[in-house]
Image (cartoon, grey):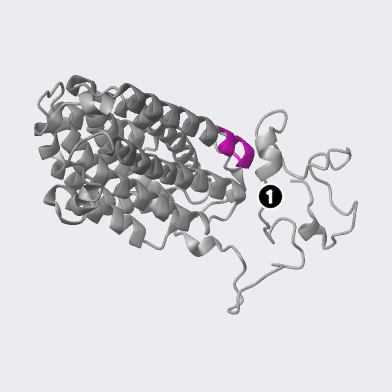
Amino acid sequence: MPAISSSVGSGAAGAAIFADSDSRKYRYFQPRGQRATHYEDVTVDVQPDPERYLIQNWIIEFADGNGAYMKDYTRALSSNWHAFRAPDQEWERTHYQRQSRIETMVQSVIANARKSGAPRAFDRVWQKVLMNHLGAWKHAEFGLGTSLMQAQRYGYTQMINNATLTNSSYKLRLAQDITLYLAEIGMEIEGWDDGAGKEHWLNDPIWQGTREAIETIMGTSDYLEQYFAINLVFEPLVGELFRSGFLMRVAAANNDFVTPPVISAAEADYERNLANAIDLMYLLVNDEKHAEHNRSLFKAWLTIHRPLAEKAARGLQPIWSEPHSKPVSFEDVRAQSEERITQILGELGLN
């Protein structure tokens, strides 16, 4: 293992040997591939770690003596937290670029829909479904985004924090997109109530299981448990169930060709977030020292969050019976979500 400043006891130039220490690239980490990517250049070791380069210990500490980032912010253990690289390789610039493209698409879809009078052509019952239940779902997305925003503060490395924060940003963007979309089409639909979604979220029995599942996630103090529960449990069992299994498959049958493209970006978001989450959890369940501990921990998390997500999914079943046209049954979509989570957990050996 190459010497680093903390192992030689000096921070002087030339005191340590590390990757590219004999070149003018000034790279002090080992890239995952043959060459470091731009993503690695701007994320790896950006967040300080006294065990690697800070021989003087933390530059900033809290009053109780704890450093800025602590490993015990999660009960998961790792031999090397710095090994994780997000498969989507997203960092600040690429994230803003992708979000901007999505927003441009969404706003264009909404503007063209209003210009053509499309919202007035929606099935009348479907209009109420959007008002009540898509209006409720935006609160779910906001809750998940808020939870991830809190979680990203405690990640031990910049790579973990980046993946968690971009996940949060996608969720909050979708909550905003839904809010603006409903406000826009509401101006074209007689009798529209902008507050209906909030009322259903707070008081409709259909949504109380979803609230319970999300608020349980928000209430945990372990940032990796939040990340795990959202991407590996709640999203396949509830998020995809409602977005893909209901909104995107039922809308067109009720003369709505606008809602699917507004929601579609969220499914692409989830594929990226899921890949990141699986990669991180895979490293932990296969850690050379702590694999068994992490596997047991993740199974314990499943016993908490999976029953709540399944309860939330069952609670949404009445929504499938509301539209006039019902091209897909709840049972078929539910079976697909169960198959999805089985596949996800199977990749990690947690079934």
Vertical order, 218 against 169 (above or below): below
- Closer-to-camera residue (157/347): 157
In this rendering, position of residue 1 left or right of residue 86: right
**Does the stretch in magenta take in 74?**
no
Residue marked by disc 1 = 45
Find the magenta span and give its range: 91-97
Q: Quadrant of residue 173?
A: top left
- Closer-to-camera residue (253/109): 109
Residue at screen point 41% across, 54% down: 146
Q: Badge 1 local density, few (<14 within 10 Å), some, or many (20+)?
A: some
In this rendering, position of residue 158 left or right of residue 317: right
Task: Measuring from the top left, give residue 274's x and y in whole percent.
Answer: 42, 36
Judged from the image, the secondary structure of the residue bearing numbered disc 1 is loop
User: Does any portion of residue 87 appear in the rendered image?
Assistant: no
- Closer-to-camera residue (253/196): 196
Residue at screen point 34% across, 62% down: 219
Task: Measuring from the top left, give residue 266's x and y in whole percent.
Answer: 39, 34
Task: Measuring from the top left, give residue 106's x and y in whole percent.
Answer: 42, 30
